[in-house]
Image (spheres, rainbow, N blue to C red):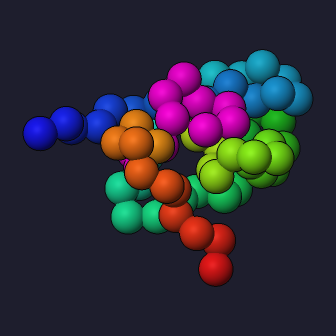
Amino acid sequence: MFKPVLESTITCPECGHKANEQMPTNACQWFYECHACKALLKPLPGDCCVYCSYGTVKCPPIQEGKSCCSKS
């Protein structure tokens, strides 16, 4: 059985700061505050979460080939 990677490095598009983060497996993360410049990151159009937009690894549902969490 496929086991998703749960760690991703988020790169802030505002200041370039990188942070290793543990991705949640039970919810999408729609917001992320940069540790350095405090910019509030949101998913880019067409992406489901901040990991899919700014991370080195896509979120667990996308890795598994499933649709990501709904925003409802």
Magenta span of residues: 52-61
Q: Is residue 59 left or right of residue 18?
A: left
Whether 60 is among the magenta residues is yes
> Foreground residue, 57 or 35?
57
Residue 22 falls in image quadrant: top left
Query: Going 58% across and 40% down the picture, which residue do you hit?
Result: 51
Work out whether 47 lies above or below 30.
Answer: above
User: Does the magenta portion include 59?
Assistant: yes
Picture coordinates of residue 27, whole percent (x, y) = 46, 64
* Residue displayed at 75% across by 46% down: 46
Q: Residue furthest right?
A: 14
Can residue 21 be spotted in the picture? Answer: yes
Residue that appears at 21% across and 37% down: 3
Q: Residue furthest left?
A: 1
Q: Position of residue 67 (x, y in %)?
A: 49, 55
Q: Quadrant of the C terminus?
A: bottom right
